[in-house]
């Protein structure tokens, strides 16, 4: 049962709408809102699931933001998300992200979401963009990572791994009751640091898409059916590995409400207990520079048409 926000939601068809679920995310929320507003998000829909910190108060202070809450188990989280997407996201361009995720794409340093969507709609006739979920981390031990609320976490979590595998994986569209296949990624720093797992960490995200009635977003935003996928590929920076990750792992392991009775959290907890000074950094770690670097490494992808579109936008801006 979701407690509904009382603020009216205007009918503005050109809005970009963001949807997220949170629990005790006060550390990341201030920059999260700043980042996505600067990128071009018009309206936020946030579901609070049993936060015990001041996350809800931070959200309430935000303009064009609607706060919902539920005390239900997180095991049911996807039904909450599907409800909001159906109610407020139908036929809108939607961003669906976790609070520790920062969506990015080629030239995002100076190209906003509205420009990206213009390209997707007019040039490619596409309704979605696939992304690589990129775990970013510090060169310090996990417990020593120092982050100031409101600052850019990529200034602290500025390293990543570039070893990964590309798969074409099957996903079940529960609307249409059929399998579909999508390019996805596995591997990365979590495998290197915590080891292989029976359940596979999927490093794929479809965060930005036009939410048509026939569109089906798979749980966890790992795949999307009923869309036309762009040839341009983005990245979602995963900023989970701040020092609060240790406490989160302990708590979520006990709650057991995440995927498969908190399978991954329990896996992480085991390794953190074995090495209290655990660090993600090693000699193969790469320091993050910009989106061009990620294109060169193949984690982002661009096309000649997109590069021409970006150049035309930059020229028109200079002539203003």
Image (spheres, rainbow, N blue to C red):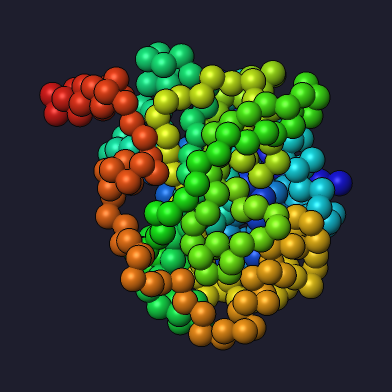
Q: Which residue is more in the foreground, 254 or 41?
A: 254
Q: Is residue 270 visible?
A: yes
Residue 88 shows in this picture: no
Residue for point 65% across, 52% down: 200
Tell me where residue 154 appears, x and y as whole percent: 38, 60
The residue depicted at 59 percent of the width and 66 percent of the height is: 195
Q: Residue at x 31, y 41 (%)?
A: 295
**Quadrant in which the C terminus is drawn:** top left
Is 306 on the left or on the right of 263, as rendered? Answer: left
Q: Position of residue 104 (x, y in %)?
A: 41, 43
Using residue 176 as the reference point, say whether residue 121 is left or right of it. Answer: left
How many numbered discs? 0
Identify which residue, 311 or 51, lies in the foreground: 311
Residue 38, horizontal then vertical, whole percent: 39, 44
Above or below: residue 119 compared with residue 301: above
Q: Is residue 28 above or below residue 210?
A: below
Seen at 40% across and 60% down, the residue is 160
**Residue 305 x/y as whole percent:** 29, 20
């Amino acid at each position: 049962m979701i407690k509904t926000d009382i603020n009216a939601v205007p009918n503005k068809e050109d809005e970009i709408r963001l949807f997220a679920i949170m629990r005790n995310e006060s550390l990341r929320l201030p920059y999260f809102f700043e980042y996505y507003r600067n990128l071009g998000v018009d309206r936020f829909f946030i579901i609070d699931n049993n936060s015990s910190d001041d996350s809800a108060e931070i959200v309430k202070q935000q303009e064009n933001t609607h706060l919902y809450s539920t005390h239900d188990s997180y095991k049911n989280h996807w039904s909450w998300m599907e409800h909001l997407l159906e109610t407020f996201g139908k036929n809108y361009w939607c961003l669906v992200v976790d609070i520790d995720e920062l969506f990015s794409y080629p030239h995002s340093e100076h190209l906003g979401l509205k420009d990206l969507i213009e390209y997707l709609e007019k040039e490619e006739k596409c309704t979605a963009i696939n992304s690589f979920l990129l775990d970013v981390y510090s060169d310090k031990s996990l417990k020593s990572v120092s982050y100031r609320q409101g600052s850019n976490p990529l200034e602290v979590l500025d390293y990543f791994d570039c070893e990964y595998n590309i798969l074409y994986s099957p996903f079940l569209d529960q609307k249409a009751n059929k399998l579909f296949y999508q390019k996805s990624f596995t591997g990365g720093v979590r495998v290197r640091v915590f080891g292989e797992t029976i359940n596979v960490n999927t490093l794929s995200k479809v965060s930005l898409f036009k939410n048509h009635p026939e569109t089906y977003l798979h749980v966890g935003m790992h795949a999307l059916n009923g869309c036309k996928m762009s040839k341009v590929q983005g990245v979602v920076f995963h900023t989970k590995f701040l020092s609060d990750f240790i406490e989160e792992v302990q708590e979520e392991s006990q709650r057991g409400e995440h995927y498969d009775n908190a399978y991954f959290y329990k896996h992480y907890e085991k390794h953190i207990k074995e090495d209290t000074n655990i660090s993600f950094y090693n000699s193969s770690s790469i320091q993050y520079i910009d989106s061009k670097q990620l294109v060169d490494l193949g984690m982002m992808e661009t096309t000649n048409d997109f590069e021409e579109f970006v150049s035309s936008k930059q020229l028109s801006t200079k002539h203003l």
